[in-house]
């Protein structure tokens, strides 16, 4: 990959692009390096021709611009105005970036298409990830598309539908008894056998493979394109380690550097245990590891410690972090579905809760333009959001019986015609 390198976000040292990504050899920083390009963003943006499937219309901005790509036509997802939800939350201009429309029904496909395309160019023989669901399902799909074997390290308690999805794509699933064992085990196989890991495999966690994170830049490109070349005031995302938060911010930065937008948005991290919020409040240069005080329903982002890259994004963008626990999460899922017809998984609706909180405390203004990123489809964690409901008894098939069921059981009285 000529003209592409990795740069430490702490000391600025550069290293050649390679499959194995470790702590900075110059300063020892436990921080994910950022991909740098020989040509500046302004030049590459000028060369974007708008052709190619899905997000690959922006291939000149991605690290595999001149190589073969592994794609399922991901990206180009809709940015939907959400007026009814906006009124309920107190925001006049609310938009939902609907990432459920991706091939495996989550935003992870943006990472996987770029990471697997790059891995194939680097000669990878096995793809691997540590995942609680979406990343594993996505990587498994793109590995199948590329004709490469895939191994997914996961843990007990992962949402059942997502495990089934991973296995249907043909990936090998390794469930570990202890959640924290995923990373050292993945690291061992990476180092011994040269597997290409798309996810983090070091502790403290730094984030996914930098090449894959570049795929998330296209979220920013698409949002601004759908807003007719303008930039929103706020972008709100669910955050675990901050891969998508960082990648999306990089995309906005590149658009600004190219003169395509005249300002930058403020980024919001909706997180579970509050590590990024604690780092901001205490003005720390690291992200503290928080206590896991409850079992999160949003299992996809249930980490107790965010990453340095996520903290940097919040500081650079004058952003904020909002803790989102279990309370109100299922209600937010149902509110989004009933107001706008969008069914997101529990993690994916955390932005709804965060926006409501920030409007209530006055951080987000009523007239601000706000984009919430719904990252994955609600069918992926039905076992978490619905449990195992008993089958309803059948209703006798007469008009009077059905009318009584509608009114007495469901509380719905049909209006008479005319």
Image (cartoon, rainbow, N blue to C red):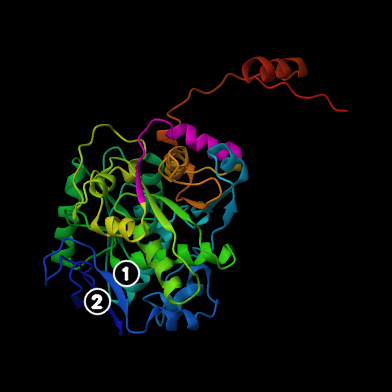
Residue located 65% across and 14% down the image? 408
Q: Does residue 28 appear in the picture of this structure?
A: yes
Q: Is residue 338 magenta?
A: yes
Q: Position of residue 221 (x, y in %)?
A: 49, 67
Badge 1 is on which residue? 211
Which quadrant holds residue 13? bottom left
Q: Where is residue 200 in the image (x, y as percent from the top left)?
A: 24, 57
Q: Where is residue 245 in the image (x, y as percent from the top left)?
A: 37, 57
For this rendering, which residue is in front, 232 or 272?
Answer: 232
Q: In which quarter of the image is the C terminus?
A: top right
Badge 2 is on which residue? 17
- Is 327 placed above or below 233 here? above
Magenta part of the protein: which range?
320-339
Mark 1, secondary structure of its residue: helix
- Is 380 placed above or below 412 here? below
Q: Where is residue 236 in the image (x, y as percent from the top left)?
A: 43, 51
């Amino acid at each position: 990959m000529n003209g592409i390198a990795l740069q430490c976000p702490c000391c600025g040292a550069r290293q050649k692009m390679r499959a194995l990504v470790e702590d900075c050899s110059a300063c020892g920083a436990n921080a994910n390096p950022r991909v740098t390009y020989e040509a500046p963003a302004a030049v590459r943006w000028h060369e974007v021709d708008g052709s190619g499937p899905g997000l690959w219309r922006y291939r000149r901005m991605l690290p595999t611009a001149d190589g073969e790509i592994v794609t399922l036509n991901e990206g180009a997802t809709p940015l939907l105005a959400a007026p009814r939800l906006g009124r309920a939350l107190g925001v006049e201009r609310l938009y939902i970036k609907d990432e459920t429309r991706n091939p495996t029904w989550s935003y992870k496909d943006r990472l996987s298409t770029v990471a697997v395309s790059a891995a194939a160019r680097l000669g990878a023989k096995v793809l691997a990830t540590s995942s609680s669901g979406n990343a594993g399902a996505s990587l498994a799909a793109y590995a199948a598309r590329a004709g490469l074997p895939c191994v997914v390290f996961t843990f007990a308690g992962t949402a059942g539908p997502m495990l089934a999805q991973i296995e249907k794509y043909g990936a090998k699933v390794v469930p570990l008894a202890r959640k924290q064992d995923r990373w050292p085990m993945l690291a061992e196989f990476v180092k011994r056998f040269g597997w290409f890991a798309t996810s983090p495999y070091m502790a403290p966690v730094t984030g996914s493979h930098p090449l894959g994170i570049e795929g998330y830049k296209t979220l920013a490109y698409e949002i601004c394109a759908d807003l007719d070349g303008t930039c929103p005031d706020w972008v709100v995302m669910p955050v675990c380690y901050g891969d998508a938060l960082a990648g999306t911010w990089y995309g906005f930065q590149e658009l600004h550097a190219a003169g395509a937008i005249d300002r930058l948005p403020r980024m919001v991290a909706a997180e579970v245990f509050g590590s990024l919020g604690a780092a901001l409040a205490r003005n720390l240069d690291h992200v503290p590891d928080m206590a896991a005080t409850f079992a999160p329903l949003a299992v996809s982002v249930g980490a107790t410690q965010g990453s340095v890259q996520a903290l940097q994004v919040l500081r650079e963008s004058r952003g904020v972090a909002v803790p989102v626990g279990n309370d109100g999460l299922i209600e937010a899922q149902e509110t989004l579905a009933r107001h706008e017809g969008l069914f997101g998984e529990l993690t994916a609706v955390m932005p709804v809760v965060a926006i409501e909180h920030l409007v209530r405390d006055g951080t987000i203004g009523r007239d601000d333009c706000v984009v919430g990123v719904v990252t994955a489809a609600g069918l992926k964690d039905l076992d978490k959001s619905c449990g195992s409901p008993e089958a309803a008894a059948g209703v006798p098939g007469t008009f009077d019986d059905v009318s009584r069921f509608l009114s007495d059981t469901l509380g719905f009285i049909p209006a008479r015609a005319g």
